[in-house]
Image (spheres, rainbow, N blue to C red):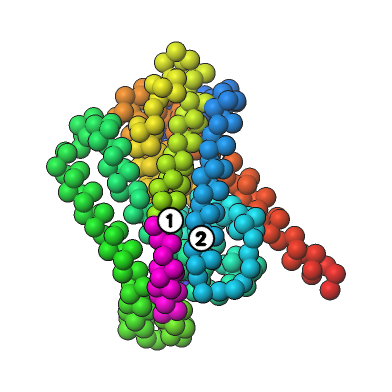
């Protein structure tokens, strides 16, 4: 067995242990039967609102991808509907695989299904990835200020310092993204000179850097930044409806939409998602997501049982919804290829 395979096994083992440990603890707080009951009894109006707002976020994400692709130096056609299916599949794999590496499947689909050069898909993916980080820093900072840093046990001075540092880093990454691609290729050739594909990868990274620069010169960066803010606002806004759907049947007088609010949910859900983007996150993000959600919402004043209940049941609902749309997207995208092969 090669070193890479052994490393993968160790990674899977560690992430599995982390996920199992967290769930073992959470199941001392809330029983599986309670989770099943919460999902079954979720308020239909809240679930419907969650799905509508979630799809609206996906529509805006699709608009951002289309804007970036059409700004690239290519004449390969792709319709808004086709791009929407690609976005659904991207969402599926981004949620399914740890550390969000699944979002790279978007590059593969654009290349294999529509014939886009790898550098175009990679450049669009890289810009979108950095933009997501860029908009999250100020939004999380606003959420903490609205909710109250002391409520979460965070020093306001430390918050300001960390937020400023990350914001400066994301601005620099966005500004120097073309150069970072070229530097990454050169560094790879120097550090792994014996790797046969190092030169080919360097060439693709150089082309990606050139493509990013061409997209920047089209003057669409301001538009995609606005879209990125709207995507994130809706992405976590839909979670507020989901939390309402789960908790309102438990206590209709306490857990109203007004009482739940937007910024506390934004803060709790975004921190949980950030944890699911780390390498220690398990398959589907299960484990760290629920643990961070439970801890954050407990600090926000929710009873420990309801914090755990909403974290586990809410994550199950979001994953089932996203997986269903992603599988549907795969089926529709693959159907023309399957028919073509059948009739050859």
Taking the magenta stretch, the answer to whether it contains residue 214 is yes
Q: Residue 102: which numbered mark, if any?
A: none
Taking the magenta stretch, the answer to whether it contains residue 184 is no
Labels 2 and 1 touching (C-beta < 8 A): yes
Residue 246 place in picture, x, y as percent: 50, 26
Within 10 Å of disc 1 (Cα), the crowding (few <14, some 14-19, many 20+) is few
Q: Which of the two residues, 54 or 252, is positioned nearer the viewer here? A: 54
Query: Which quarter of the rendered picture does the C terminus lie within?
Result: bottom right
Q: Which of the two residues, 180 or 292, is positioned nearer the viewer here? A: 180
Residue 308 sits above or below residue 131 on the image: above
Q: Is residue 32 left or right of residue 218?
A: right
Mark 2 or 1, nearer chain start: 2
Q: Residue at x 55, y 31 (%)?
A: 49
Q: Is residue 120 left or right of residue 86?
A: left
Residue stretch in magenta: 205-224
Q: Is residue 81 left or right of residue 337?
A: left
Q: Element under label 2?
A: helix
Residue 80 sits above or below residue 198 on the image: above
- Please give the residue where the numbered disc 1 appears in the rendered image: 223
- Residue 102 visible in image: no
Residue 263 place in picture, x, y as percent: 35, 33
- Residue 80 visible in image: yes
Q: Main secondary structure of the magenta part?
A: helix
Q: Residue at x 17, y 39 (%)?
A: 156
Q: Is residue 145 left or right of residue 295?
A: left
Q: Residue at x 46, y 59 (%)?
A: 101
Q: Residue 67: which numbered mark, if any?
A: 2
Q: Which of the two residues, 219 or 282, is positioned nearer the viewer here? A: 219
Residue 240 sits above or below residue 329 on the image: above
Residue 326 place in picture, x, y as percent: 61, 50
């Amino acid at each position: 067995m090669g070193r890479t395979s052994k490393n993968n096994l160790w990674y899977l083992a560690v992430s599995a242990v982390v996920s199992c440990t967290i769930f073992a603890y959470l199941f001392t707080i809330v029983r599986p039967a309670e989770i099943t009951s919460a999902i079954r009894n979720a308020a239909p109006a809240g679930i419907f609102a969650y799905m509508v707002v979630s799809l609206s976020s996906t529509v805006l994400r699709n608009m951002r991808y289309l804007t970036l692709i059409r700004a690239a130096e290519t004449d390969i056609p792709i319709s808004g509907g086709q791009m929407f299916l690609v976005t659904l599949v991207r969402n599926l794999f981004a949620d399914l695989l740890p550390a969000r590496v699944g979002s790279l499947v978007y590059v593969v689909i654009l290349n294999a299904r529509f014939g886009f050069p790898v550098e175009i898909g990679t450049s669009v993916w890289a810009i979108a990835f950095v933009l997501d980080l860029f908009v999250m820093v100020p939004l999380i900072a606003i959420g903490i200020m609205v909710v109250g840093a002391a409520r979460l046990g965070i020093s306001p001075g430390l918050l300001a310092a960390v937020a400023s540092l990350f914001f400066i880093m994301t601005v620099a990454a966005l500004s120097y993204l073309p150069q970072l691609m070229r530097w990454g290729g050169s560094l790879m050739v120097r550090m792994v000179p014996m790797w046969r594909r190092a030169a080919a990868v360097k060439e693709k990274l150089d082309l990606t850097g050139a493509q990013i620069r061409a997209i920047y010169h089209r003057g669409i960066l301001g538009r995609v930044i606005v879209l990125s803010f709207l995507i994130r606002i809706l992405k976590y806004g839909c979670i507020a409806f989901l939390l309402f759907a789960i908790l309102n049947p438990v206590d209709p007088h306490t857990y109203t939409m007004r009482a739940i609010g937007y910024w506390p949910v934004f803060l709790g859900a975004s921190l949980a998602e950030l944890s699911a983007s780390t390498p220690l996150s398990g398959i589907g993000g299960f484990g760290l997501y629920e643990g961070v959600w439970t801890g954050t919402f407990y600090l926000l004043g929710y009873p420990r049982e309801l914090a755990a209940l909403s974290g586990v049941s809410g994550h199950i609902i979001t994953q089932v919804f996203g997986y269903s749309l992603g599988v549907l997207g795969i089926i529709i995208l693959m159907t023309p290829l399957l028919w073509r092969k059948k009739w050859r």
